[in-house]
Amino acid sequence: MITMPGSPYTAKDMLTAATMPSTTDQDERTRCSSLDSQALGIMNSSLTHNILMHGKTSAESLWNYLHDKYGSPGSAAVFADYQRTRHFQISGNSDPAPQITELNTLYTRLEGNKCDVPSLVCTMTLLSVIPQSWDNLATSILTSQTTLSQLTWDFMSSAIQSEFSRRLTGAHTACHSDIPRGDCSPSWKKNPHDKQQQRPQGQQQQPQGDSS
């Protein structure tokens, strides 16, 4: 925010206070005129040379001019956000909640910039960006939710979160089972022919007796 040196107030604060009142009190009108000049000076001091030739003589008119001209992102910025939604992907290797929030933020920003995307399209996109190994989830959802009205963003987010939790619980259970599975098995158990070389510490080979 643009502030006046030595003051906690921003130019916007001063602009609000500088609005000329309808009163005929000369002291009050003088005070507002002084605040307006200060706010105008603060804003001008923060502008680049090519913008300084704006020709505005009051803080309010300059503020409105800057807001109308520079207050909204250009088409390139809006298109960049749209492209990000098209190439978005949920990794599946970590909690998907932050990634779902990120995608939702992109759609919210597009809507704020007058680029409305239908809610059903947003929901379908969310379903399409899950990991390929989760295809069974998409099949299950589309089989059980047979009407489009059932496909909401909240429902899809919850389903994705539940799938991640289910897979995480399954992996945790497999690695702590009494039955060795895959890479959860201790390395010394994988090759029965190398037991003597790869036995755990503390299980040393017993010395052979004296043959004499």
Image (cartoon, helix red, strand yellow):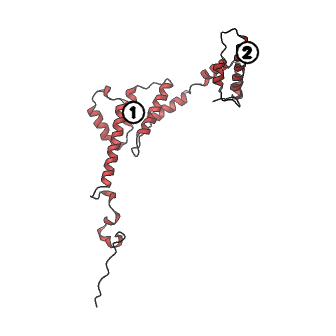
Residue located 29% across and 55% down the image:
177
Say above or below: 212 vs 105. below
Callout count: 2
Quadrant of the drawing holding the N terminus: top right
Q: Is residue 110 left or right of residue 52?
A: left
Note whether residue 57 is visible: no
Residue 194: name its quadrant. Answer: bottom left
Q: Nearer the viewer, mark 2 or mark 1?
A: 2
Residue located 49% across and 23% down the image:
114
Label 2 – label 1 distance at C-alpha: 58 Å
Q: Is residue 17 left or right of residue 176?
A: right
**Marks 1 and 2: in contact by CB < 8 Å?**
no
The residue wearing badge 2 is: 30
Q: Position of residue 47 (x, y in %)?
A: 69, 28
Q: Secondary structure at mark 1?
A: helix
**Could you tell me the amino acid type at mark 2?**
Thr
Q: Position of residue 148 (x, y in %)?
A: 31, 27
Going from N to C along the chain, the mark reached first, 2 or 1, is 2
Between 191 and 1, which is closer to the camera in this rendering?
A: 1
Q: Position of residue 119 (x, y in %)?
A: 39, 26
Say above or below: 206 vs 168. below
Note whether residue 90 is visible: yes
Structural crowding at the residue carrying mark 2, measured as other residues with C-alpha within 10 Å and reported as few (<14), some (14–19) or many (≥20): few
Residue located 39% across and 28% down the image:
121
Q: Position of residue 62 (x, y in %)?
A: 66, 20
Between 82 and 205, which is closer to the camera in this rendering?
A: 205
Structural crowding at the residue carrying mark 1, measured as other residues with C-alpha within 10 Å and reported as few (<14), some (14–19) or many (≥20): some
Q: Is residue 17 left or right of residue 153?
A: right
**Could you tell me the amino acid type at mark 1?**
Thr
The residue wearing badge 1 is: 125
Q: Secondary structure at mark 2?
A: helix
Between 23 and 80, which is closer to the camera in this rendering?
A: 23
